[in-house]
């Protein structure tokens, strides 16, 4: 794991910046006041991005080409130079071709909002965690999510996003589960495609990552993942395939880990054979930060750009081209891909233009997405929604719910307005791997919605004291959290800090106990039978508290569904224990020479012997009962499915009727699964389609979905392609992977 120090980085950078601004003087001033307007035949927008890229390429010198193939360091750690001065001090910067008016690529992490705005003295909206967006199952929301990120990146002077995480949740203890979109490749792939489309709609280069199989953080720079080809193509790679072919990201970030022996960033199978040949990806591949390990091998395998520096793609690359060990055509292909992506994403035609981010709109969108993402897991005796008029006393307990809500950490971290909510005001700039609490107070949101009630808060650190308070209240609302971050995995899926005991004690003391979870991964719930209601609120973003308040008091009807299975226990996971790296694979001891870097940390082996059986496919196939199934979520209204009609064809057509049988408006996520013919030897079912439909009380709608034939196919390794096997397919429709009232079997040829 790399360490970062933004604060010290800022101080040095800021001083150097001021010094160099004087020295670099006019060039930088010119940039600030009038960004270079590229001119040249490549500015003919009637030409294709490929044609335009070739026109630029023809004019470039060898040094200019090499300069395009790598970053110039992590700006916050490096002194400011005339070349990187225009950068907004994100996490990576490529210089472009100033002589030809081709701008630099200024990259910022942006998983759930723009990172590092604090060090830049700016504001960024924190959206709910990506896993929350996945729980919305809402393609429109995913687009809006990406579009907000794109707009805020642009306003802050960036023209490239490092977001779009889509490694499926094979290992729910992965500390980055909150940054990803759940366990199913069709759900995750469809949503990431929309998110990328949204980001790129703001003329910002979009990215999809971490390609591929970066499913655990422990030993991520060393681990060697073993997986069979068919299982790989039908699971993790399918999510990327959908993301790449439907979302058209300009960039793909290859991951730190090894896959079947080779590092991802020099893995010919992943980069050249699958991504660039089979999926016809026309954009560029950049390495994860420090994930490049070679020059000739990586280049031949298909890595186009080294980040953040130039160990392998700088002087070494130039020497290799001059020596003929890297053909000029190969180098030109890398440069072409970068340039064509810049034209395709619009970063050349629509130069960066700083502006002021709209925080009000940001809050509104963040809240709206969170409202559509919260999952109601349990609601006995209609404990929710709360009726403010009937409540005299409310106990609010735990998880710093007096001041804030937790966020996910690492390179995804968005800086909270005013600093970390649990720190003294004005302090609390974000630090690597520190719990960051957004100043969005559930306590205040609850008080605002129940103005006549007495609302009392207990920190929840002493279960007995919390239970005492709960006993005296009409309703007890316990907030519980599980923080996670890049650079670590969860030791277990249990709630930390004695919160299981807290929930159990409060639920015994007050039968009207509501639990609100703030987690990125599934958690185990030894207390599940005790509280009256349970909400999963994920990491709720900038305005999480208002969204939770609106769901608790019923102005919003919950409509999210789980994008990850919640297992009963870790013993039920495909790998009950996480394979941890031996000490020598954790980090280098002593100075890291280029040779050591090239070799990488010694590998340790993780074998995905569960193959394609990820998430619900595993529990289904192994007959393991779960706590809450994939695709599950309740509502304050009820829905009924009827009248299934399935018509074979190039795209199988699935039609059914969905009715809101309750007394209030709601949005239902309808899920379509398929069981393949026995000969396919697949798990019992797979998700093949979904849609989210708003229905007024009593309303009925006819719903039609067209199923992509790929989703009904197997990957035939011998033919290197998707194959629809002839046979009987059972199509199942309903409101969760374990509640599928409609079934029909069709024969496909
Ligand atoms: C992370 C990437 C991130 C990059 C730049 C890496 O450690 O894995 O997701 O984009 O750093 O911050």
Image (spheres, rainbow, N blue to C red):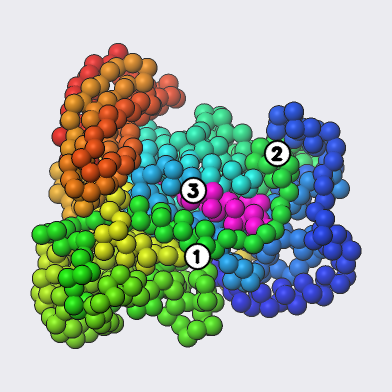
Circle 2: element type: helix
User: How many neighbours does mark 1 have within 10 angstroms: few (below 14), some (14-19), or many (20 or more)?
Assistant: many
Left or right of residue 428: residue 493: left
Circle 1: element type: loop
User: How many neighbours does mark 3 have within 10 angstroms: few (below 14), some (14-19), or many (20 or more)?
Assistant: many
Between the residue at mark 3 and the residue at mark 1, the CA separation in whole angstroms equals 19 Å
Residue 452 locus on image (x, y percent) = 25, 77
Residue 16 locus on image (x, y percent) = 77, 74
Left or right of residue 132: residue 273: right
Name the residue rendered at 38%, 26% in the picture. 708
Nearer to us in this view, 16 or 370: 370
Looking at marks 3 and 2 on the same chain, the residue that comes earlier in the sequence is marked by: 3
The dot on residue 399 is: none
Q: Nearer the viewer, mark 3 or mark 2?
A: 3
Nearer to us in this view, 596 or 381: 381
Left or right of residue 612: residue 119: right
The dot on residue 144 is: 3
Looking at marks 2 and 1 on the same chain, the residue that comes earlier in the sequence is marked by: 2
Looking at marks 3 and 1 on the same chain, the residue that comes earlier in the sequence is marked by: 3
- Ligand 1 lies under 8 Å from the Cβ of mark 1: no
Report the residue that reaches farthest toward the top.
749
Name the residue rendered at 24%, 37% in the picture. 699
Asked where in the image residue 719 lies, by quadrant, the reply is: top left
What's drawn in magenta, residue-wise?
145-168
- Which residue in the protein does label 2 denote? 343
Asked where in the image residue 284 lies, by quadrant, the reply is: top right
Between the residue at mark 2 and the residue at mark 1, the CA separation in whole angstroms equals 29 Å
The C terminus sits in image quarter = top left
Q: Is residue 182 visible?
A: no
Q: Is residue 109 above or below residue 452?
A: above
CB within 8 Å, label 2 to label 1: no
Name the residue rendered at 27%, 82% in the picture. 457
């Amino acid at each position: 794991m790399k360490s970062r120090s933004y604060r010290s980085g800022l101080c040095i950078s800021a001083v150097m910046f001021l010094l160099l601004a004087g020295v670099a003087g006019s060039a930088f001033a010119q940039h600030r006041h009038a960004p270079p307007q590229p001119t040249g035949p490549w500015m003919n927008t009637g030409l294709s991005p490929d044609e335009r890229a070739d026109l630029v390429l023809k004019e470039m010198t060898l040094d200019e080409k090499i300069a395009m193939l790598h970053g110039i360091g992590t700006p916050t750690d490096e002194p400011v130079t005339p070349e990187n001065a225009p950068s907004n001090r994100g996490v990576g910067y490529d210089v472009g071709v100033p002589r030809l008016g081709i701008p630099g690529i200024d990259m910022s992490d942006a998983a759930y909002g723009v990172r590092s705005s604090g060090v830049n003295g700016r504001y960024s909206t924190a959206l709910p965690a990506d896993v929350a967006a996945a729980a919305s199952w809402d393609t429109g929301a995913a687009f809006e999510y990406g579009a907000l990120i794109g707009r805020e990146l642009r306003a802050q002077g960036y023209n490239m996003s490092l977001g779009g995480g889509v490694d499926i949740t094979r290992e729910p203890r992965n500390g980055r589960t909150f940054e990803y979109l759940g366990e199913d490749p069709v759900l995750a792939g469809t949503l990431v495609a929309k998110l990328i489309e949204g980001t790129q709609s703001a003329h910002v280069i979009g990215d999809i990552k971490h390609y591929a199989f970066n499913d655990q953080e422990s030993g991520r720079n060393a681990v060697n993942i073993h997986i069979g080809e068919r299982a790989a193509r039908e699971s993790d790679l399918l999510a990327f395939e959908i993301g790449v072919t439907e979302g058209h990201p300009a960039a793909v970030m290859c991951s730190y880990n090894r896959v079947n022996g080779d590092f991802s960033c020099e893995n010919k199978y992943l980069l050249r054979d699958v991504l660039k040949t089979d999926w016809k990806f026309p954009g560029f591949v950049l390495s994860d930060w420090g994930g490049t390990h070679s020059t000739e091998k990586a280049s031949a395998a298909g890595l186009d750009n080294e980040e953040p520096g130039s160990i392998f793609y700088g002087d070494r690359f130039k020497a290799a081209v001059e020596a003929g060990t890297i053909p000029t055509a190969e180098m030109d292909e890398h440069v072409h891909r970068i340039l064509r992506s810049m034209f395709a994403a619009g970063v050349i035609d629509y130069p960066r233009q700083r502006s002021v981010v709209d925080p009000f709109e940001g809050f509104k969108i963040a809240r709206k997405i969170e409202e559509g993402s919260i999952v109601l897991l349990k609601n006995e005796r209609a404990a929710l929604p709360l009726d403010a008029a009937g409540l005299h006393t409310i106990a609010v307990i735990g998880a710093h719910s007096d001041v804030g809500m937790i966020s996910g950490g690492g390179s995804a971290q968005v800086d909270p307005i005013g600093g970390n909510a649990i720190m003294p005001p004005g302090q609390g700039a974000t630090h690597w791997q520190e719990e960051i609490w957004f100043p969005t107070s559930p306590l205040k949101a609850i008080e605002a919605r129940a103005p006549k009630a007495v609302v009392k808060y207990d920190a929840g650190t002493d279960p007995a004291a919390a239970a005492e308070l709960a006993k005296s209240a009409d309703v007890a609302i316990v907030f519980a959290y599980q923080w996670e971050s890049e650079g670590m995995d969860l030791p277990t899926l249990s709630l930390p800090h004695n919160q299981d005991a807290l929930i159990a004690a409060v639920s015994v003391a007050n039968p009207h106990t509501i639990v609100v979870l703030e987690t990125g991964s599934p958690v185990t719930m030894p207390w599940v039978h005790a509280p009256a209601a349970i909400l999963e609120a994920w990491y709720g973003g900038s305005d999480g508290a208002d969204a939770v308040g609106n769901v608790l008091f019923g102005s919003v009807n919950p409509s999210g569904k789980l994008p990850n299975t919640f297992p009963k226990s870790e013993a039920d996971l495909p790998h009950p224990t996480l394979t941890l790296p031996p000490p020598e694979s954790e980090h280098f001891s002593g100075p890291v020479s280029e040779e050591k870097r090239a070799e990488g940390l010694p590998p340790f082996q993780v074998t995905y012997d569960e193959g394609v059986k990820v998430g619900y496919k595993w529990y289904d196939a192994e007959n393991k009962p779960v706590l809450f199934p994939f695709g599950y979520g309740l509502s304050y209204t009820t829905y009924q499915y009827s009248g299934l009609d399935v018509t074979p064809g190039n795209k199988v057509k699935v039609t059914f009727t969905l009715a809101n049988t309750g007394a209030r408006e709601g949005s239902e996520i309808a899920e379509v699964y398929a069981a393949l013919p026995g000969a396919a030897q697949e798990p019992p079912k797979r998700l093949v389609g979904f849609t989210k439909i708003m229905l007024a009380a009593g309303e009925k709608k006819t719903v039609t979905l067209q199923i992509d034939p790929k989703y009904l196919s197997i990957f035939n390794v011998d033919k290197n392609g998707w194959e629809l096997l002839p046979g009987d397919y059972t199509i199942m429709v309903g409101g969760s992977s374990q509640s599928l009232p409609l079934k029909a079997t069709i024969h496909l040829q």
